[in-house]
């Protein structure tokens, strides 16, 4: 199957099927956000209507610490969805990423499905997207074409080796991956974001990514869309028993998002994606160490309707974040990052077994 055909198939499956990471036996989300509690401030001492939601990310000013995370593009049928998402980003003055640009690099006729993002969001922070597995194939020249395609402010390099491992057409050659990332960070004309796509990033790999020169890390943790799950449905439709088995077995593989935020806090900007569903999740992520959050799956269905539907969904998230900030006495994004948090359950166990001190977040 062509890269372009896979893109529209993936989009449809994300709308029609349950592709999220499955909840634990106790009903908690795999992201770990259910194990995080922010400490209520009964004397917030601030005016909720005067909160400063703004933040600066890679030199760009955002009106809220939110990104519309990389989702789609690469097929004519994805253009309208990208236009709706970009229009919302422009209206709300937040950031937006595009889906993998591989299809358009391979076939320039598909560029329009990506270029529409910049057309509809001329003033927004827009970042491109290409897979680590394609870095050596495309080279810096190919990546610069991807930058030019959308006048990108940054380029994301995505790590999706879980998905590649469970699909028949997957590229499973990860040899030399960090060296290719290092070269890209050194030579590309825009800052580089290295992002996982649902399996998370551990501390050692976060350090390696930082040392390779990445400007930011997107943890892409377990808890949101399971790309192994998406591939399970694709395999089932093809009658591919082996890939269906692999997708099912590895459906919940990875490091939960809340854990990955702590693991990946290595002194460069951090994006939390992977099961971020509410403004409260955003607040918890920032309290754990994230700079801002990305949201993808909850925006797919609204994007297939209209720009206004996407705006409505994001405005709800922003209002939830405002309430969380008010109830913790946080006047701005920096202060919500310093708010006390208590970590319990599996997330606490996971972090402590990994050698992290969870008590430090419960600042008095």
Image (cartoon, rainbow, N blue to C red):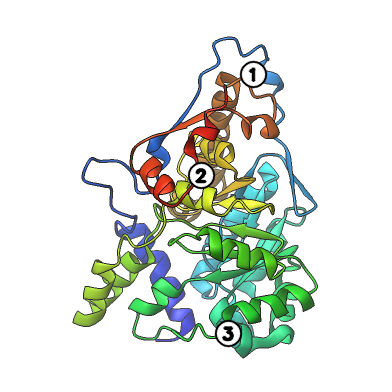
- Left or right, residue 284 beside residue 349: right
**Percent x, y of residue 19:** 33, 59
**Percent x, y of residue 331:** 69, 24
Q: What is the C-alpha distance between the residues marked 1 and 3?
A: 50 Å
Q: Do the residues labelled 2 and 1 touch (CB within 8 Å)?
A: no
Residue 281 position (above or below residue 207): above
Residue 161 position (above or below residue 345): below
**Percent x, y of residue 95:** 67, 52
Point out which mark residue 176 bears.
3
Quadrant for residue 5, please give it: bottom left
Which residue is at a point 57% across and 83% down the rendered structure image? 134
**Callout 3: SS:** loop
Quadrant in the picture for the C terminus: top right
Which residue is at a point 47% across and 82% down the rendered structure image? 3
Point out which mark residue 48 bears.
1
Quadrant in the picture for the N terminus: bottom left
Q: Which residue position is annotated with label 2?
A: 309
**Callout 2: SS:** helix
Counting residues from the start of the chain, the first of labels 2 and 1 encountered is 1
Q: What is the C-alpha distance between the residues marked 3 and 2?
A: 42 Å
């Amino acid at each position: 199957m062509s890269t372009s055909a896979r893109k529209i198939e993936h989009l449809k499956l994300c709308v029609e099927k349950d592709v999220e990471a499955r909840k634990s036996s106790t009903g908690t989300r795999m992201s770990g956000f259910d194990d995080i509690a922010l400490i209520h401030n009964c004397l917030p001492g601030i005016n909720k209507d005067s909160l400063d939601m703004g933040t600066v990310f890679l030199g760009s000013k955002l009106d809220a610490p939110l990104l519309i995370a990389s989702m789609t593009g690469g097929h004519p049928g994805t253009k309208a969805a990208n236009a709706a998402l970009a229009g919302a980003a422009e209206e709300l003055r937040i950031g937006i990423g595009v889906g993998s640009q591989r299809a358009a690099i391979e076939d320039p006729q598909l560029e329009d499905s990506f270029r529409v993002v910049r057309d509809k969001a001329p003033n927004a922070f827009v970042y491109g997207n290409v897979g680590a597995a394609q870095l050596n194939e495309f080279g810096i020249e190919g990546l610069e074409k991807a930058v030019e395609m959308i006048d990108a402010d940054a380029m994301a390099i995505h790590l999706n080796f879980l998905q590649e491992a469970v699909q028949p057409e997957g590229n499973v050659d990860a040899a030399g991956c960090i060296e290719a990332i290092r070269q890209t960070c050194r030579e590309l004309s825009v800052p580089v974001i290295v992002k996982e796509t649902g399996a998370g990033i551990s501390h050692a790999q976060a350090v390696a990514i930082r040392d390779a020169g990445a400007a930011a890390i997107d943890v892409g943790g377990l808890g949101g869309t399971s790309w192994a799950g998406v591939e399970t449905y694709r395999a089932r439709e093809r009658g591919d028993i082996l890939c269906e088995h692999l997708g099912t077995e590895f459906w919940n593989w990875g490091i939960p998002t809340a854990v990955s935020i702590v693991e990946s806090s290595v002194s460069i900007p951090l994006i939390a994606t992977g099961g971020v569903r509410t403004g409260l999740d955003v607040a918890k992520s920032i309290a754990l160490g994230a700079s801002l959050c990305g949201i993808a799956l909850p925006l797919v269905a609204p994007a297939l309707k209209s720009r206004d539907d996407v705006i409505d969904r994001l405005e709800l998230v922003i209002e939830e974040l405002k309430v969380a900030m008010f109830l913790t006495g946080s006047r701005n994004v920096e202060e919500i990052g310093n708010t006390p948090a208590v970590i319990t359950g599996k997330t606490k166990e996971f972090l402590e077994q990994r050698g992290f001190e969870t008590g430090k977040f419960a600042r008095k």
